């Protein structure tokens, strides 16, 4: 595992706590920042409140006009590093931005990468995306070169974090042998993980595995079902497969598609037809793993 170590650059030499995100992603951080009572938060920050430490640090770093807080980069960086010492992912992200853009400090690619990595690994979605793209494309202006190995690490990291888009990209790389040796089994495993999250693109791609018998046994019922779940992008493939199926197989595939939609309360346009109202209460759960096709 590639892991970027940043501890040496902290001004305070005490161990980091494992905090992670201090604001829930459902919270509107910008509104919280703008509407904060700075004087109250300053007292809280001095008492060890990590959320207050972050808000005070950001206020000093960028200024907070409505609270009459003038920009003071030194104080901003100090409080952000205090919050970072407590493990706040948001603080690491702002510190990364400071070293990326030269806010109160000289631009420093190494510190930018290190802080960004810590923010990403502590759960900051924006940092996860930024560091992945940083290594995918590089940033000549700040002095970071493309790095395929690090890019693939963060691609897999984002996939493991539960993002279907990156699961699909990782699957394609294993299937096509880009950055990895060709591995259809891993490609299939990643695409099925995205399928289970009800991603339509992944469902269309997974249908091909069952249609062609790649990794799994050929199964036209499952192929039809997955193409059907893929919505409009899977219609042509679904209808092509249907020509190779019996009427009973098509009816089963439709029932399986409807079962999937009911279980996830996620409906496709095609389910508006009466044909998509079969009784599926007695149908056993359908597995898409290779073992189920043995």
Image (cartoon, grey):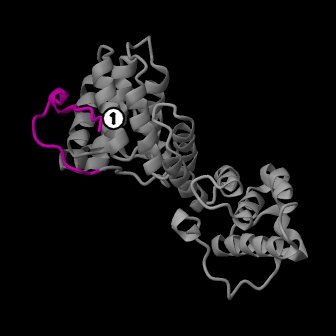
| Vertical relation: 68 (above or below) 250 | above
Is 270 placed left or right of 230 in the picture?
right
- 220 or 58, nearer to the observer: 220
**Up-down: is 237 above or below 124?**
below
Q: Is residue 247 magenta?
A: no
Residue at 26% across, 48% down: 50
Vertical placement of 82 versus 263: above or below?
Answer: above
Mark 1 nearby-residue class (10 Å; few <14, some 14–19, many ≥20): many
Q: Residue furthest bottom?
A: 282
Residue corresponding to mark 1: 117
Per the rendered image, the range of residues in magenta is 1-19
User: Is 125 placed left or right of 74 in the picture?
Assistant: right
**Can you say which quadrant of the picture contains the C terminus?**
bottom right
Which corner quadrant of the image does residue 241 belong to?
bottom right
Q: Of helix, strand and loop, which one carries label 1?
A: helix
The residue positioned 88% from the left and 60% from the top of the image is 243
The answer to which image quadrant residue 131 occupies is top left
Which residue occupies the foreground of this view, 82 or 229? 229
Q: Residue at x 22, y 46 (%)?
A: 86
The x and y percentages for residue 266 are 69, 66
Camera-side residue of 102 and 205? 205
The percent coordinates of residue 192 (x first, y second) are 56, 57
Q: Is residue 9 magenta?
A: yes
Q: Residue at x 79, y 49 (%)?
A: 233
Q: Is residue 131 visible from the viewing direction of this image?
A: yes
Q: Main secondary structure of the magenta part?
A: loop
**Image quadrant occupied by the N terminus:** top left
Q: Position of residue 2 (x, y in %)?
A: 30, 34
Residue 8 in picture, x, y percent from top left: 15, 28
Residue 156 shown left or right of residue 12 in the figure: right
Residue 71 visible at all: no
């Amino acid at each position: 595992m590639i892991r970027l170590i940043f501890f040496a650059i902290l001004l305070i030499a005490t161990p980091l706590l494992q905090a992670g995100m201090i604001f829930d992603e459902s919270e509107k951080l910008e509104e919280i920042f703008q509407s904060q009572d700075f004087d109250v938060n300053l007292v809280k920050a001095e008492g060890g409140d990590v959320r207050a430490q972050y808000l005070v640090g950001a206020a000093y770093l960028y200024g907070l006009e409505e609270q009459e807080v003038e920009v003071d980069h030194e104080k901003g960086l100090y409080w952000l590093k205090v919050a970072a010492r407590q493990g706040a992912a948001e603080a690491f992200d702002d510190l990364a931005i400071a070293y990326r853009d030269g806010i109160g400090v000289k631009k420093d690619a190494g510190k930018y990468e290190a802080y960004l990595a810590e923010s990403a690994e502590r759960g900051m979605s924006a940092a996860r995306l930024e560091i992945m793209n940083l290594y995918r494309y590089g940033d000549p202006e700040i002095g970071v070169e493309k790095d395929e190995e690090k890019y693939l690490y963060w691609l897999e990291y984002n996939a493991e974090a539960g993002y279907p888009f990156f699961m699909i990209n990782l699957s394609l790389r294993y299937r096509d042998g880009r950055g990895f040796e060709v591995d259809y089994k891993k490609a299939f495993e990643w695409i099925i993980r995205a399928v289970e999250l009800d991603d339509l693109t992944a469902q269309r791609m997974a249908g091909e595995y069952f249609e062609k018998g790649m990794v799994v046994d050929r199964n036209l019922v499952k192929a039809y079902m997955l193409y059907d779940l893929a919505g409009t992008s899977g219609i042509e493939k679904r209808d092509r497969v249907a020509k190779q199926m019996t009427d009973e197989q098509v009816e089963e595939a439709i029932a399986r598609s409807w079962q999937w939609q009911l279980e996830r309360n996620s409906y496709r346009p095609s389910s508006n037809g009466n044909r998509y109202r079969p009784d599926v209460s007695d149908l056993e759960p359908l597995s898409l793993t290779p073992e189920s096709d043995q």
